[in-house]
Structure formats: structure tokens, C-alpha cells
Image (spheres, helix red, strand yellow):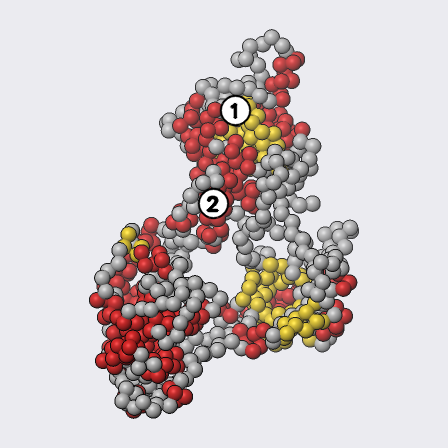
Amino acid sequence: MSSKTLNVLLVDVSKTVHRQLHDVSSGLHSFVHSRVIFKPKDEVGLVLFGSNATHNDLNTETESQQPGEGEDQQQYSGVYVVSSLRSLDLGMLRMTQEEGLGALKGDKEGDFLDALTVGIDMLLKCPRKATGKRLLLLTDLNSEVELDEEFIDSLVAQMQAHKIQLEVVCIPSSSSTSSPASDNKAALTSVVDRVGGIVRSLGEAQEDWDHRQSKQTGPLTGLFRGELQLGESMSVKVWVYKKTGEEKFPSLKKYSPSLPPDDPDATHLVKRETVYRSTTNPDEDDVPPERRVSAFKFGKQRVPVSAEMGAFLKFQVEKGMQLVGFTPRTNIPRHYFMKDTAVVIPWPGQSGPTDKAGLAPPKAAKAARCVSALARALDASSQCAIVRCAFRAGASSVTWGVLLPHLVKGVGDFLLFNHVPFAEDLRDYTFDSFFNAKDKVQPSQSQLDAAESLISSFDLSASSGHEDPFPLSMQCNPALARFRALLKSRALDPDAAVPPSEDFLTTQPLLERQTQPTLALFRDVFPIESKSAFVSGTKRGREDDGGNGEEGKLRRVGEEAEEQEATQPAEAVVGGISIHSLAAARVSNVSLQTPVEDFRVMLQRRDGPGGERGWVEKAIEQMNTLILTGSGVSQDDGENGPAILNADTLSECIRSLRTSCVVHLNPGAYNDLLIQLQANRVKPKIQTIWEMIKKSQLSLISNAEVSTSGVTSEESTSFFKDRDVVASNASTAPVVVNNEDDFDDME
């Protein structure tokens, strides 16, 4: 049976707690939220005491037996059962809000003994079975309560008989220590000691509910149960459990609001059903499972594989763990460990005559001695064992790992299993040494000292005489905590804002003060200098060519483009967002109105299936077409009809196209365009444009600018003089680097 606890919240709302209702509501929210996340099967009931209203079964029963008594003479008055034991839901969160508690607050004393009696009665009357029962009492202990020892003993006897635990959470009070508070705390502490429980402050309890939550794993959720083969004729029976596991984000399911929200039988979950139709006859009925065959991609085709053939070809490994050998611990660094850590323990013995899972006591003792001997030998020799594992029968993959000794004094000797990568999975990153670097990037001694001090300050381990500032048991995933807080706030208010991430990043003020001088020194010795970026179409890592090579030419092209953009009037900027950037996402074609601006925006786009390369090819092709159409070489009878651009606009378009073809290593597009314009230069409109091209020296792109061009420097220089330039030499296809592997499509 899964773990399930019945929790009854007994909350003090008497006159001495009114100022702390906000803190009480926040604590109750944390408790209910922690139950929803970590104990979703728990049931919770809510009881308020010290209220002006009365609503509980014991009061109703005594009133029916003794009618006619006033409210003050009634038993269990001022105790209001807001909710009986129920599963956790959104309604319970709303009940614990400050508004709900404030509506039932009272101006009388809060008798926590009456509240305990009502809570015990609720737990005993609950018909559902549970593994645990608990009373959670929240009070400031400042109310006058009649401490009847005989009555308290009867409550303790009932709680002990039914194994009911008691947890007392003390609400901070603004008043000074009074005699009732001291007496009440002493009485409750005595009850807690006798029935089992704890007394703590509201702040400590809320911190525990918010952070210190770990997943409780049952004894039957092991990874492996079998034999660890130590040799051909030697093995030991072991169990393997997860020691650590990554907590995933909860899977969100689709919700359907079609059904009424108050329908108790409605799950509102969306179910997905997949049907298969024939491509040759899609109108016929669904294809049944016996007519379906799985197909796997092989290149651009799909190869059908039947279930029988798939089972025959499937790689299967027998279940088991096999010792391969030993290696020094230094050969397996910590960063090689992958996935989660598991603990290997000897197969336990039988706990009783009905225990069929455990081994007989003699065999269990031998297994324990064998595992202990192996762990101690590994620890003494500073070695680790390499093992080959298949944790499931019929597994399709093999896992390699290392066994490390884990010796716990007073508990036993165990082994820790960590996954290690295959040779293909290793990534060894090497960095160049400063000894081979240029003098201008050589760090000074002060910079080296500042860097060493900064790295030393990253050490978060506990220093001598101090506690660990960041114990592992208290370090929760801030992203998960923020996500859960968002779910809670959105459940109560759909328009709630996303909580800031700073609220979930815990820091230590003492550490911040200690590291501030180190950070300030590091900033001083490593000043940040802003440098203008340049457009580069070559790969990084090439040696400096003094500006004469291809990289230097591309740098000059980028600088010229920046100078041209700098001469343009600045665009309007509103709130840090430019008008151009807002329109950039909508520009997908080179328009007639602003061709140069649209062309530059398209070159900068990276979205879409083709990415940067797709937009570059599209922009160059459309600009080429626009120039030919606008100059009259060809006519476009599209939706805009024939378009003729003025000479200045065409000249700017040609200049932008040439620069982009050089930067993006596509000389053929520009060279083909220039040859077509040369062939039609006798036309009056093109003759004017041609003269402007000659004057600006926008000649063919030579192999000195782009190495893949088929035009030499001499041919580019004499292009405007020699009319017999061979077109085939000028036209070169753009260079496309295909990083895709033919094997990527194989499955």
C-alpha cells in the first residue's frame, strides 16, 4: 500500500493571533503546497479554534444530549470545522487564504485542548485507511486554557492507542512572555514527548515545508536484483538502488473546459487517439493493427521491417552485472560520472518466515562479507572496479560503470555505482597556453593573482570551525521551486505575475561580503573595453595576414559597410526598441519602396527552416531579379506589374548586392548580373546605370576577393574595357558548406 497520511490542521484564530494571520496563512499555504507536490495522496482537514462561530460533530452531539445551554456553557464551543478530511485540491488552498481565516476569527480565548479533541475525533471517524495520522497544531499559546491533567492523560492515551502524532507550531507573538504561554508550552511539550512529534516555531516549520522535501522511495523500487559476477566460478547476490535521482519538471497535461467545472466525475483530461489511413485510398476505413508495418528511414527512403524481423535483428543482452577489471581511482575523474548514482548492497536476509525475497541467514551473511571485503580492498588500494551491466532482462543496451567503496561506520560497507561514458562520448577540451600567446594578451602578475583569488573564493566547502554554508540537504532546484510557486499563484489567480527568480536563489550575506573585495579587484585588473565589430565570412583561428588576405579584405568590406550605415540618418528609437527592429520580423521580400533596407534585413534573419543560408540565398535572388526588372533588362508581370526604378536606387542596390556577395562568398550571383547589364548597356536607361557602375568601379568579383571566383584580378580590372570577357569564367556557383552527414538520416 502506498504511503498516505491523514493530516488535521488545528489553527488558532483567537484574539491574540489577529495580527499574525498573514503569517499563519502563508505557513498553511506552504504546508498544503508541499503536500500537493510531494504527498499528493495525503488527506487534509482544517479546523479553526478561538472563533466566534461553532461547527463540529462533538458540539452537535453534546448539544442534543444537553439542550437549553447557552453558547458559553456549550462544550467544544469556538471550534469550527472548515473542512473535513479530503483529498488535496484547489479548494483547500483557497480555504487557507488570509481572507478565509479572517472571516472566522474570534474575540475569545482559543482552547487548544478542545481543538485536539475535535481533531482526534475526526481522525477516528475517517473510514479510509492510511499509514499515518497526524495533528498539526498552530497556536501562539497565549490563551487561558484549563489544563486538566486527567483530561490531558485521556487525550494522550487515545493518541497512543491509535498511533496519532502531534506537531506543535508556535506562532510568534508580539506580547511579552506570559504565564499562560509558559504553562501551555510545557503541557504541549509533555504531550509531544509521550505521543511522538515535535515543537517548533512557524518560521522553522515553513522553511521545512518550502525546501526540505525529499522523495521517499519504497523498498521495492530497485534498479537490479541479481548476481554480481566476480569471475567464471564466483558471484555474489546484490541489490542495486538509486541513491540520487534528478527531479524532473512535472508533466503538464492538456485540460478541456468543455465539461462543467462542478461535475465530480469529469476528469477534463484530453485523450489523444491515432488512426491510420491508406495513402492510396484515404476514404476507406482505418487500417487495423495487423495490416500495419513499421518503417525506418534509410537515406531518403523508408524500409519496412516486420515485427518478426525486428525481433530477430534486435540486440538483446542478458540481465546481470559482470566485473571486468580494476583501475586506479585517478584514472576515473569525477567529471566522467554520468546519470544518477546507485548504491550496491548485499542481498539481505529473511526478516521472517513469510519473507520470500530475502536469502537464508547463512547465505545472506556470506554475501555481506563478500561485498564488505570487496569494498575494503578497493578502499585500501585506492582502486575502482569496472563493471558491465544490463539491469533488465532483454535490454537493448549495455551500461558500463565503476564501483567505488562506501564505508559507513556503524552501518555497513557498500559499493557506489556510477555510469561512465564510452570512448566516443568523451570530450577532452584543450586550451592554448599563455606561453605561446602574443605579448599583447599575456596576463600580468597582478591579473594572475586576481584570477587565482577569484577561483579560490568559489570554494563553498566548510572552513575549519565553521558550518557548511550550503549543505546539500538544503539546496533545492530554484527552477523547480519557482515553477511550483507559479502553479500555486496561477491556481488562485489566473492573472498572477511570474514570481521573480531572485526570490528562489539563496545567498549567504557573509559570503557576499567576503567575496566583494575579490570581485572588485578582478574588475579593476581586467577592464572591459568596447571594440567595433566587423563582418567576417571566414572561420576563426586563422593567423593574421596583415589585412592582405581574404580575411583582411572582408574586414575592410565590413568597415566600409559600417561607414555607409553611419552616414545614414538615425532611426527612431522608442523605449530601447527601434522601429527597424520591430519591422524586421515582417520583412520577407525585397520591396520596390525600400529595396536596400529590406535586403539588409533579410540578410540578418536566422529564423525559418533554412536558417541564415536560406535567407541569404533568397535575398540575393530577389535583389538580382529586382535589379534586372527595374533596369528594364527583364519585365516582371507579377502582382506589381512592370517596375522601373530610378538610376540612383539601382546603383545603391547593385553596390549592396556586391558587398553581400563578397561577404557571403557568392561571387557568381553578382558576376552573372553584371554580365547581363553589360550585354544590354546600349539601352538608354541601362547606359546611365552602366556609367555609374564604371565610375564606382563595381567590377566583377575576382578570386583575390573570394577564392572560389573564376575571375582573375586582370579580368576584373579590364572588364569595363574588354567587351569579350567570357561569361562562363565569370559565373561560379556559390559555395555551400554542407555539414550534414549522410548517416544522420539513418535510423
Give the answer, above or below, for where 362 lies relative to 495.
below
Q: Are marks 1 and 2 in contact (CB under 8 Å)?
A: no
Question: Which residue does the image show at 63% across and 28% down from the upper left?
Answer: 122
Q: Amino acid at mark 2?
A: Leu
Instruction: Give the camera-side residue of 121 and 587.
Output: 587
Q: Is residue 620 visible?
A: no
Q: Secondary structure at mark 2?
A: helix
> 669 or 444, which is in the foreground?
669
Asked if residue 351 lies left or right of residue 403, the reply is right
Near mark 1 (Cα within 10 A), the count class, few <14, some 14-19 or many ≥20, is: many
Residue 623, percent across and down? 37, 71
Task: Give the residue type that dot 1 points to.
Answer: Phe
**Placement of the N terminus among the 4 image quadrants:** top right
Q: Position of residue 689 (x, y in %)?
A: 28, 76
* SS type, badge 1: strand
Q: Residue at x 40, y 50 (%)?
A: 501
Residue 260, image quadrant? top right
Q: Which residue is under mark 1?
A: 49
- Label 2 belongs to which residue? 486
Q: Is residue 359 left or right of residue 729?
A: right
Q: As displayed, is residue 491 above or below residue 723?
A: above
- The image quadrant where one finds the C terminus is bottom right
Q: Residue at x 46, y 75 (%)?
A: 428
